[in-house]
Image: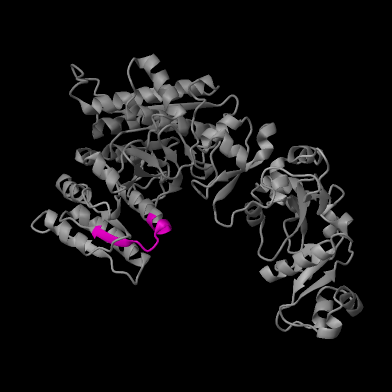
Amino acid sequence: MKNLKFVIALFLFGCLSIFAQDKKFITYKVQQGESIQSISKALSITPYDLLKLNPDVKDNVKVNDIIIIPNNEYDPLEDIKNADLSGISDKDIIVDKYIYHEVVPKETIYSIIKSFNISSEELNESNPFLATDGLKIGQVIRIPLKVDALQVEAQDSKTQPYLVKAKETKYSITKKFGISIEYLEELNPKIAQNGLQIGDVIIVPLEVPASADDEFIIYEVQKLETLYSITKKFKLTEDELLALNPEISAGIKEGMLLKIPNKDLDEKPVFVDVLPEGKELKIAMMLPFKSKRDSLNFKGDRLLNITTDFYFGALMAIDSLKAQGLSVHMKVFDTENNKDVSRKISDQVELQEFDVVVGPMFLSNVKVVSNNLRYGKPLIVSPISTKDHSNIDNNKLIQERASLENHTEKMMDFVKKNYDNQDLIVIKNDSEKSKQQYNRIIQDIQALNPEKEVMILEPKDGYIKPDDFKVFRDTLERNIVNWFFVTDDEPAYLGDVFNNLGVFPEADSLMVFGFEKDRNYNKIDNNFLARVNFHYPSNSFIDQNGIAYQKFEAAYKRKYYTFPSSYAVEGFDVTYDLLMRLATDSDIINQGVSERISTKYDFIENTSGSIINKGIYIIKYDGLEEKVIRSVNQESTKLLE
């Protein structure tokens, strides 16, 4: 294929002056006083586009410089307009009313003229060398396009004709050109009615997104989006976005296709917040306030603090949605953290009137409520439990926090994607949890490089001695990154691991992967976590310097005269995202990925048919600072204004 393109390039260069009126690009001699800016303005293109055509021009041009410019008289449709394209393969290239075809084995002059419906005279006239050299495998020959009745009309200068090839679908073409199926059908009304057929000539965007290395994605600007909101959504500066999309210097418009760095390549689209007018929702909250007690001890009762903070955050979300026009009716029930009370509440006929029930907090109570409401109207949301919910048979149950199994899967996906022949070391513990985690990951780790041994470091007499680490370290290769995998969260085990790895000499490059980071890590020196480049998955991450969190914090302090806890942020995120989605559609799974203040939401169907959020962050230590490696980042910056 490269050979084909090279031959075409040489041929076109030789014919440039003869067929200039048919060329997409022509040469131009720079005149006195002209610059890149003035030339691009005269051609109605951006300086960025002009410099792309002339990579040898670094800053500006000089008088008498010869540069390449777009030919304003060129009609891109003329290449295939009214042409019979039935014989074209996916390796053929169409330029200037000719097909450039690379000869493949078993092809003959006869088969070519039959396939392309031309005469031998036409073939020889376009390829004089055939008379002397004959037809050879690998040759590039030029075949004139034949006129047919097909008519293709471009809607604007930003579109081009495209030939539908075998196995191509509307979906694959929209992915290729970075557009929606709706936009493709808008460009081609016939395919909306008649479907897509092999050999169809359709209209597509002029430029194909560069995605060979998956470095970028193409994003379609949604209604009411601004330059500011898009930069926040994808964690970009305005300068970064403008550098990739110079055309937006004149402003952002709905439907624009933007090139965005691929920080998180999710198959699902980004969920866009759009509240329909006149929408009403009813939400019930089942929380363990234990309000029937004689007194409430906020200082000594951690559960009461968690519950109250979560509830206050939920109220902030409801206030925000109401301010945007959503009508929300909420009722709160106190479960007292008791299964019998939870069962009685869920037995009430009144609960069937609600669209969603948030709570109870704990899995045992969630099971009771889920069983009672299995065939009812409301969705049941388990808001904070990370335990396995897959044994609960209810397709209306939503688990908002991913389980340890989900974390392990996400972490191993990240490891597989980034592995590059590093040494692999798994650190075991004697606990049952460590054994289970070891069994989950060992086959995947061994499969990363079957030719390289995975080293196992195990405790002796209940703990790993410093001398064990020293002896083990002496067996490792120098000048290579060593990847360690932590399989437990038991405090003594974590102390053994990080207190020893954290003092390895600078010559040893380490990276440690965990599968959770709970309160037991609070006793580990952050300098050691930073030293070993610790990576871990998490259901949530609060960027306290982010605009979304700062606005939430300011609004929360105004209302409650204190700083919000992580549970207050979670109460906001769960309630806001859930009601925004329900206001749009009851289909939670297929709405796309969203990101709120601290949580990413990517809902899938669980093994039992229920719904689970697999929006998991991979977080790393960058020095003493924790950072998210990948993020869709749909920040709700406008929500609390």
Q: Is residue 609 left or right of residue 566?
A: right
Of residue 182 and residue 48, the one placed in the foreground of this image is 48
Classify residue 95 by image quadrant: bottom right
In terms of depth relative to the viewer, which is nearer, 261 or 82? 261
Tell me the colour scheme of the image.
one colour
What residue do we see at 57% from left, 39% from top?
A: 240
Q: Which stretch did the figure color magenta? A: 415-426
Examine the rendering and report whether any part of residue 464 can be seen. Answer: no
Q: Residue furthest left?
A: 461
- The residue lying at 87 percent from left, 73 percent from top is 126
Residue 296 as seen in the image, left or right of residue 161? left
User: Where residue 85 sits: x, y (%)?
Assistant: 80, 66
Q: Is residue 58 magenta?
A: no
Q: Count the labels in the image.
A: 0
Residue 289 position (above or below residue 395):
above
Which quadrant holds residue 257?
Answer: top right
Residue 576 placement (x, y as % from top left): 45, 29
Placement of the N terminus among the 4 image quadrants: bottom right
- Whether residue 10 is visible, yes or no, is yes
Q: Position of residue 119 (x, y in %)?
A: 90, 77
Rendered location of residue 199, percent (x, y): 76, 64
The picture quadrant where one finds residue 212 is bottom right
* In the image, residue 420 lies in the stretch drawn in magenta: yes
Q: Residue furthest right?
A: 121
Q: Is residue 107 above or below residue 24?
A: below
